[in-house]
Amino acid sequence: MDSINNIIDYDNSEDQNQQLIPAKAFILALKRFIYRFLLIDSNIENMILYIYFLDFTLNLWTSDINRELIKKLFPTCLLVSHAYNSYVYLHNNEKTTNKRQKKSFASTSSTTRKTLIKKYKKFTD
């Protein structure tokens, strides 16, 4: 799974100069692939996933995804048979990352709130 972790941005930063594939976009592309191809044709399990994910006419990717980034980073070692396990793995990692970010935000917000209250009290005293 290192081949996937090295190319995925779990933070989903909306940087215009993105260097990694956003996790949400990759998860959605995998989900679309699974529904459109794996549920219909099981004879493609030993094919390279790269072939499908670089065919942008299949509309697996969202329209805002950088095609050059996909061409550059998509792992060539993944087979079609890895699609579902990759989806589950990425989905779980993204959920974990989101929980961690929410906790971090909550504690930061709490600290900021306390600081503002202290400043307000000093100001009003």
Image (tube, rainbow, N blue to C red):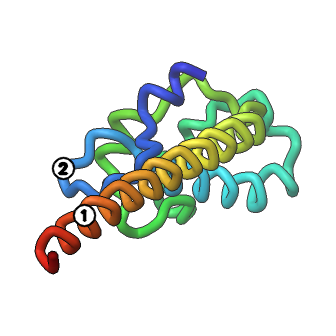
The residue nearer to you, when weighing 90 against 104, is 104
Task: Tell me the residue at 33%/35% (across/down).
Answer: 72
Residue type, label 1: Lys
| Mark 1, residue position | 118
The residue nearer to you, when weighing 97 against 108, is 108
Q: Count neighbours of disc 1 (C-alpha within 10 A) and say few if under 14, some if 14 to 19, many if 20 or more.
A: few
Check the picture and name the quadrant holding the C terminus: bottom left
Residue type, label 2: Asn
Task: Tell me the residue at 24%/64% (across/down).
Answer: 118
Q: Is residue 58 depicted above or below 89 in this figure?
A: below
In this view, the residue farthest toward the left is 123
Relative image position of residue 2 (x, y in whole percent): 53, 19
Q: Secondary structure at mark 1?
A: helix
| Mark 2, residue position | 17
Q: Count neighbours of disc 2 (C-alpha within 10 A) and say few if under 14, some if 14 to 19, many if 20 or more.
A: few
Q: Secondary structure at mark 2?
A: loop
For marks 1 and 2, the one nearer the N-term is: 2
Relative image position of residue 51 (x, y in whole percent): 55, 40
Q: Quadrant of residue 71?
A: top left
Left or right relative to 37: residue 33: left
In this view, the residue farthest toward the bottom is 124
